[in-house]
Image (tube, helix red, strand yellow):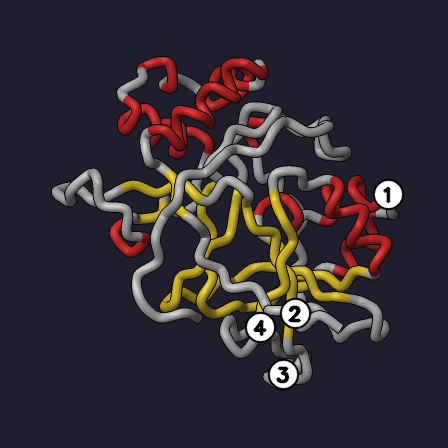
Amino acid sequence: MAEGPLIVTPFDPPRPRPAPAGCGDRPAHEYPWTDGVPSAPVGPSPSADHRLVVSVGSNSSPRVVADKLDIAPDEARRRIGSVTVCGVAIGHSAHVSRRGFVAAAPYAAPDHRLSTTALWLAEDELDCLDATEPNYRRISVSTGVFRLTTVDSRGEEILPGVREFDLYDSLHGVLASTPHGMPADREVLADREVLPFGTQTAVYGWLAHRLIDTDLTGSAEQLCSRLAQPAIGTDLTHRIHAAGLARASALSPVERIPS
């Protein structure tokens, strides 16, 4: 990763895009719907053309993945397995989703060890999953920077040859604020503390305090329902960025050399 301070630049929130498929029958306030997440480690790649995608948020759920990829839940359950990633943590994307919840997003955290899930996907399945993530870009990162491990029941490494894996990086950055007592006009990335991933009640309480907005108090169900109204949700996203409550994820993608 590059040395020296990283500078936060203002985000221009992406324009609304068509709503992604899947997850529509799950209550927004119960996000991330990680029911039935497998505990067994992810297995080796089924073929050379598959890529390993590390999940944060609802993509850890076999039911969600099954909906998004239009495959049987049992097939999704067989593909998903546990992994540990060093140097990555989970925060909140700095935007309000179309259903009114604030989704998960990864960010670089050098001293953190993240226990999460991953799955292998073929190219057409990657395209399908990409289409369900309009507020993210899929990036490839190096295991030389973000060490990835997964072991079997004997303690032996399952994926010793994996040099890269993919993550969905938020186009909006992650929710973060300047620590109390720091000058508000300083824009150095290291000065901003990322809000760790939590419940919708917690994230809206955090925003209510920093935006001094009593309309962001109440039950998560009520808040998600209200913020699912496009004008209200979009306005809150803009206010988040105007107040400086976002920073870049600092994830360093693999640089591709043009052929």
Element on which disc 3 rests: loop
Distance of label 3 from label 1 (alpha carbons) = 31 Å
Q: CA distance from mark 4 to mark 1?
A: 29 Å
Q: Position of residue 124 (x, y in %)?
A: 86, 54
Name the residue at the front extreme: 259
Circle 1: residue type: Asp
Q: Which residue is mark 4?
A: 142
Of marks 3 and 1, which one's residue comes earlier in the chain?
1
Gap in Å between the C-alphas at discs 3 and 2? 27 Å
Q: Which residue is mark 2?
A: 256
Tell which tag, 4 or 1, sits nearer the viewer.
Answer: 4
Q: Give the mark nearest the N terminus, 3 or 2.
A: 3
Query: In the rendered image of this protein, does residue 237 appear above or below residue 108?
Result: above
Which residue type does callout 3 highlight?
Glu
Report how far apart the C-alphas of labels 3 and 4 lie in the structure: 17 Å
Choose the circle earlier in sequence order: 2 or 4.
4
Q: Which residue is mark 1?
A: 70
Viewer-closest of 22 and 51: 51
- Residue drawn at the location 71% of the way across and 70% of the way down: 258
For the C terminus, give its image quadrant: bottom right
Tag 4 secondary structure: strand
Q: Could you tell me residue 201's position as x and y percent?
A: 42, 29
13 with respect to 239 (left or right): right
Given this view, does label 1 or label 2 mark the residue nearer the observer? 2
In the rendered image, residue 147, in percent from the top left (x then y), is placed at 52, 75
Checking the image for residue 157, the label placed there is 3
Comparing labels 2 and 4, the label whose residue is closer to the camera? 2
Q: Which mark is residue 184?
A: none
